[in-house]
Amino acid sequence: MARERQVPFQKIQEACKTTGFSMYFLRKGCLDGTVPHVKSGSTYYINVPALLRRLGATTEEPEGSGTGERAAKVTDISAAGRKRA
């Protein structure tokens, strides 16, 4: 099983494959500032780990939460937007 190297900054087309978001969503988010990115010339590079953290779709523990309780982990991006009962 070959393991791909994870690159934090990806072009929109690559980030689309990695995250499952549409190219339209990522482009629009870059233009309105809701998607963390860097622009080099006319190319947008999406900061994929920061985007997933912002959406709450990573399995990483938040640093310094201070509450003592473990945050609920979300491993499925589609479940990140759903409300919990």
Image: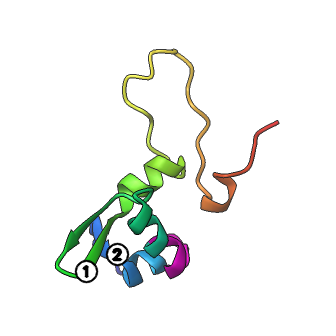
- Residue at (67%, 52%) from the top-left corner? 81
- Location of residue 64 with respect to 16 vertically, above or below: above
Q: Which residue is mark 2?
A: 3
Q: Is residue 77 or residue 27 the one in the foreground?
A: 27
**In the visual, does 76 lie left or right of 83?**
left
Residue 28 coordinates in the image, percent (x, y): 48, 71
**In the visual, does 64 lie left or right of 43?**
right
The magenta span reads 19-26
| Secondary-structure class at tag 2 | loop
Q: Which residue is mark 1?
A: 43
Label 2: how many Cα within 10 Å (few below 14, some 14–19, many 20+): few
| Secondary-structure class at tag 1 | strand
Q: Amino acid at mark 1?
A: Thr
- Residue at (60%, 60%) from the top-left corner? 77
**In the visual, does 60 lie left or right of 22?**
left
Q: Is residue 1 visible?
A: no
Residue 29 coordinates in the image, percent (x, y): 46, 65
Instruction: Work out which residue is located at the far right of the displayed protein and give it.
Output: 85
| 21 in magenta | yes
| 57 in magenta | no
- Location of residue 21 with respect to 47 vertically, above or below: below
Q: Is residue 77 visible?
A: yes
